[in-house]
Image (cartoon, helix red, strand yellow):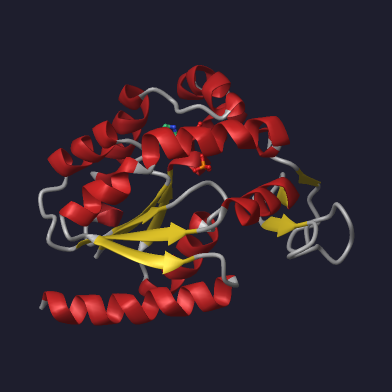
Amino acid sequence: MKIILLGPPGAGKGTQAKTLSGKLNLKHISTGDILRAAIKNNTPLGIEAKRFVESGGLVPDALVTKMVAERISQSDVEDGFILDGFPRNIQQAQSLDSFLKIQADLTVIYLDSSENILIQRLSGRRICQKCQAVFHTQNMPPKKEGTCDSCGGALVQRPDDREETIKNRLLVYREQTSPLIEYYTARKKLIRVDSDKEPEIVISEILKILKKYSATQK
Ligand code: AMP
């Protein structure tokens, strides 16, 4: 099974992808995580991508598409994967279509959220510098302020989670990514889930829908 998680920043793509990955035994491929790791390690990709990521814009298609093509050609994702953060525009979706040999097992889960909830989630998000665990100042505070519950690392705000950048990311989403809702609806691949709800409710809805959906595809 190949799953694309589609939705605005803050809709919970990363959180849901991690849980789904464990439950369905599928590898989680997050383009944002790959780019952040490249930036942290100062690789040639990271050096090129840094200014786009930090301003909340999209990294050029050629760079991201090559990165995803390489990742999904690896043997550990032969039987499926969960794509989180890709595609982010029509051109990337067309590239993905061209490198997926089989598309019958592709499902796009659209996490639909209202804008006030997205802003609240993004602005309060804190990430562990060491293990990347995700917390929230109000929704999921750590036991000790500023410290990761799992590894004791320092919790920081992603530079692109600052208020000015959040606005730009939402704008980029509306203009470039949201046309993918229509793109995948026309291809009968899209399933919509209300992602304003608590993550536990969202995941159980996704699993229920996937079960029904795969039964109808047989
Ligand atoms: P995310 O963690 O998915 O919110 O991504 C963080 C940032 O990485 C985005 O704001 C973009 O700058 C960049 N990025 C992630 N995925 C893509 C993509 N598919 N195309 C272009 N830029 C991307």
Q: Residue 30: where, in percent of width, then height?
A: 45, 47
Quarter occupied by the C terminus = bottom left
Q: Residue furthest right?
A: 144
Image-based side of 146 in relation to 42, left or right: right
Quarter occupied by the N terminus = bottom left
In this rendered view, identify the residue nearer to me: 33 or 57: 57
In this rendered view, identify the residue nearer to me: 29 or 164: 164
Image-based side of 207 in relation to 48, left or right: left
Q: Is residue 87 above or below residue 172?
A: below
Q: Residue at x 55, y 28 (%)?
A: 53
Question: In this figure, what is the number of numbered marks?
Answer: 0
Q: Residue at x 47, y 32 (%)?
A: 172
Residue 41 visible: no
Q: Quadrant of residue 136?
A: bottom right
Image-based side of 15 in relation to 59, left or right: right
Q: Residue at x 30, y 55 (%)?
A: 76
Q: Is residue 12 above or below residue 204?
A: above
In this rendered view, identify the residue nearer to me: 182 or 8: 182
Q: Residue 78: where, in percent of width, then height?
A: 22, 56
Q: Residue at x 64, y 53 (%)?
A: 116
Q: Quadrant of residue 147?
A: bottom right
Q: Residue 184: where, in percent of width, then height?
A: 23, 52
Q: Residue 190: where, in percent of width, then height?
A: 27, 60
Residue 145 visible: yes
